[in-house]
Amino acid sequence: MENYNILVKIKQILKELVPNKDIRTNIPPLDFVVSLIFSYIGDSKTSSLASIRREMKSNSNKNISRSSFWERLSSKRLKNFLYAVVSALMTELSMKTVNGNDLLTALGVIQIQLVDSSSISLWDGAKEDYPGTRTTAGIKWHACFDLLTGVMNWFQFTPTATNDSKCFPKQDLEKKLTIFDLGYWDFGLLRKIDLANGFFLSRLKSNTVIQIKEVISGMSNNHVGMFLKSIPFHYKRGNIIEFIGEKKYKKEILNYRVIGFWNVSERVYHWYITNLKVSANVIYPLYRLRWQIELIFKGCKRSLNAERLTSNQSNIIESLLLASIAAHLISTTVLSLGSKHINEEQKLAISFQRIAKVSVILAKNFLLFFTNPSKKYLEILIRKIILFSNEIFDPNYQKRKTSLARLKLALEKIE
């Protein structure tokens, strides 16, 4: 039998955090929480509160009135249960690895984490709690995900009007590589990561004032002492330009690697800044991996209904989003168990969007396992995960190399 300890551990976490009995209700809190998580995902038709209630009644074979359902869904107690569950799942699942340890070793890091946010439109009535920017109301989900496992290890909810730069993970950064986009750009952040013995990789803002201290490759030493923005790059000077950039930040002098890659379609150089000690050839394929966080968000929105928060009530909004996040975290077990049955090339083509879709298919199996003591439901769930292991990676991986495969190839060329 497949190693199923992680599934058993998740079941134990749920039991420890959410009461399994409550004489005041037909559906105990534990069953309500688990049923909410797995009744909410899937077809968009199940995203209304009425359809969630119907699905919950069907799954539990117990009646729950409209008023009772709304009262429980809108309660702070339910939201607190879900926050506790999500926090515990992040802690437990963050210790799991699937593949890619050779990549981490080659890069000299212990983890690659992706930081970004995703905005979700809300009904207009939620504007007091969550004022929007392009829409009347909206909530922004800030998150940090492990690139190789898809496990979220930090998150925060804010109104969409909140600037990304104000929301960055407060956690241990030592020996971890953090990849983020221009929304987080700030020399103070780079310094913070560097001082924590961590690594960063980001695009360089086009208007950044940074001086060339030392030319590594791709241009003349005559440019030393000049500011990058003052140098015209109207044509391709080489495959890669690299220099050590100097920036006066408050009372300090910061020195970091700046690497430029020629963009054929735009006919300009795209500049990246990092303190990572690897060949410059690796930087572009490495930064391309940032797109994986967008795919995680898409999987959560389209398959796990994270963008269908059909209420004006703040507790319900957060509870539904937390339920979707919990579903995503639990879905990473499909990756950790299913990846044992695919080859190394296929592991490099794992798709978080496809994993989310498989999780929807297995939702009833997860629900039965978490709400029933019988071991047969665990055995059925594991067999189903193994059955769908060939669905968790991009089937076109042999025709079109994935970003992870390109990175591995670039590292192998260096060796």
Image: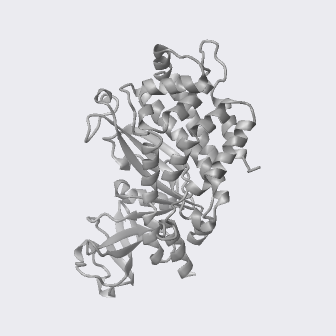
Residue farthest top in this picture: 24
In the rendered image, which quarter contains the C terminus?
bottom right
Figure check: 78 above or below 151: above
The residue that appears at 51% across and 73% down in the rendered structure is 277
Figure check: 79 above or below 105: above
Figure check: 135 above or below 211: above
Q: Is residue 134 left or right of residue 64?
A: left
Could you tell me if residue 96 is visible in this image? Answer: no
Percent position (x, y) of residue 263? 31, 73
For this rendering, which residue is in front, 398 or 204?
A: 398
Residue 260, quarter of the rendered image = bottom left
Percent position (x, y) of residue 88? 61, 39
For this rendering, which residue is in front, 354 or 313?
A: 354
Percent position (x, y) of residue 296? 47, 51
Percent position (x, y) of residue 195? 50, 60
The residue that appears at 46% across and 36% down in the rendered structure is 321
The type of colouring in the image is one colour
The residue that appears at 64% across and 16% down in the rendered structure is 22
For this rendering, which residue is in front, 52 or 17?
A: 52
The residue that appears at 48% across and 21% down in the rendered structure is 75
Q: Is residue 90 left or right of residue 189?
A: right
In this rendering, the count of numbered labels is 0
Could you tell me if residue 243 is visible in this image? Answer: yes
